[in-house]
Amino acid sequence: MVTDSFKLGFAVCLWLIPSLIATSPQFALQAAISKKLDSSPSDIPSNLYSYQGQHGHSGRDGRSGRDGRSGVDKTITIDGSAVDLNLSGTDGEDGERGGIASDARCYRLDRDYKSDIRLPNGGRGGDGGNGGNGGNGGSLTVFYDRLEDLKQVYVLSTGGYGGRGGTEGRGGRGCVCPSKIFNNYSYHQPDRGERYQEHQRYYCHDGRDGSWGRVGRDGADGKPGTLYLVKKGIDLRPEKLTETINLSSIEGGKTINLSNNIWQSHRGATSLLNPSSILADTYQEYIERLSRKVSLNWQGSRVISDFEDELIALELTEKNELLITYPEKVWLDTTVTTTDSNTLLTINHAIGESETTRLARGLVSGNRSNLVFSAIDLAQKSDIINTQFKIKYRTNSDRFTSKRDSLSYKTRYEGIIPTTAIGKNNQHFVLNLGQLPIDSKYLLPGTAIEVELTVIRSLGDNSAEQKIYWQGEID
């Protein structure tokens, strides 16, 4: 006969079993292993399935491979004797493999933890190093008398192979929840009250596995060498295509000699040499040498040392033309005189770019046809710089609104101010707004006006704009 106490104990056990299963780490652990990594428990570190911890460290990026060495450039003079040359570039090195990231460090959960949990992530795998570029083949310059003598020249001038990019590093593994849902039970018994149980449910989120690194880029293959042909007896001197000079160095005059060796391209290089030769198919034949003497002359009124850090670049083209690149922060007014092989560059004026937009508003006075707006050049360069004015003239259309409210203004005239309406006294400009095609009722005393003046400054190929704003009443 079963006693009442035995029945009560058996019922309590049946009530506790589901809760024990749901909150048991050992039960949830076995399910998480096969779901997360699809492997047996014996293959997995036990600390990978606990709560809390630290993110994994990222793997080290692989070192890039060194570039291959380019072949040596060679110059020879042939007389019909056999010549054997190897001018090939070497291969680039392979990039290193990216480092493997570390797994997240996972710890056991405090059973009294009372919030949702997001577990640590695995580290990111390191990137593979880039492969080194292959070296280029060396060029071969041949001075010859007879083209058939080139058949005795064997040259191997291949480019080296590019190195392979390093493989990516594996990402680290993130921590895995023993159970996605876990329960927290607590018991409370207020004073003189009945004891009761409080149940809270929390959620666990797996840490993410770290991403794998990037595969390194393969290096580029080197280019084969080029054949250059020059007839015997020609004085092949080094060319000087460009020259960069400091602006302050031309005081008192300066002369620069530029030169350019002109070549003509042909195809079929290997057909001229020993048939076993390997190099670029396109070869270059020397045609002529261009030269130009460039004289620089300073005529500016400014002290030239003010521009000691500014540079002028000269370049001689294949058409024997001179390209001049002026400094960006200095405006130059120049005169260029060119003859067959000589160029004279005269600098008449030099102004700092920051000095070109230093106009300030002067007085606004008068009304009707005598309304004037004045502007003053604080840098005092208006005797050198060309100046043009564009204006937007607006009036307040509602006398009940604030005179500072731009939305209440309407445009009455917008356009270029003609030179006939501009007076100039040294660095002082007087703009006769009353002479513009503006209805006279918008020029009356007491009218609230808004002026937006655009100042357009230019010198040679340089130009800049400055805006001056003014809002007020006509006197």
Image (tube, rainbow, N blue to C red):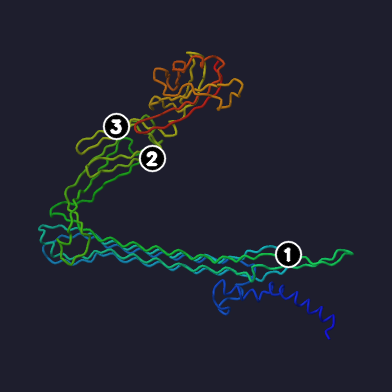
Q: Residues within 10 Å of mark 1 (few under 14, many from 20)?
A: few
Q: Which element type, helix, strand or loop, lies under badge 3?
A: strand
Q: What's the CA distance linking mark 3 and mark 2?
A: 19 Å
Where residue 81 appears, as percent x and y from the top left, is: 12, 65
Q: Nearer the viewer, residue 260 or 193?
A: 193
Amino acid, disc 3: Thr
Residue drawn at the location 72% of the way across and 76% of the way down: 17
Task: Measuring from the top left, give residue 449's x and y in whole percent.
Answer: 53, 21
Indicate which disc, 2 or 1, sits on the residue closer to the N terminus.
Answer: 1
The amino acid beneath tag 2 is: Glu
Quick check: marks 2 and 1 in contact, CB under 8 Å? no
> Which residue corresponds to the image point at 40% horizontal and 29% vertical from the top-left?
457
Quadrant in which the C terminus is drawn: top right
The total of numbered circles placed on residues is: 3
Whichever of callouts 3 and 1 sits on the residue coming sooner in the sequence is: 1
Q: Using residue 129 as the reference point, say whether residue 172 is left or right of it.
A: right
SS of the residue under disc 1: strand
Q: Which mark is residue 200?
A: 1
Residue 409 higher or lower than 164, as above or below: above
Cα gap from disc 3 to disc 1, whole angstroms: 88 Å
Q: Height in image: 134 above or below 13?
A: above
Label for residue 310? 2
Residue at the front extreme, as displayed: 1
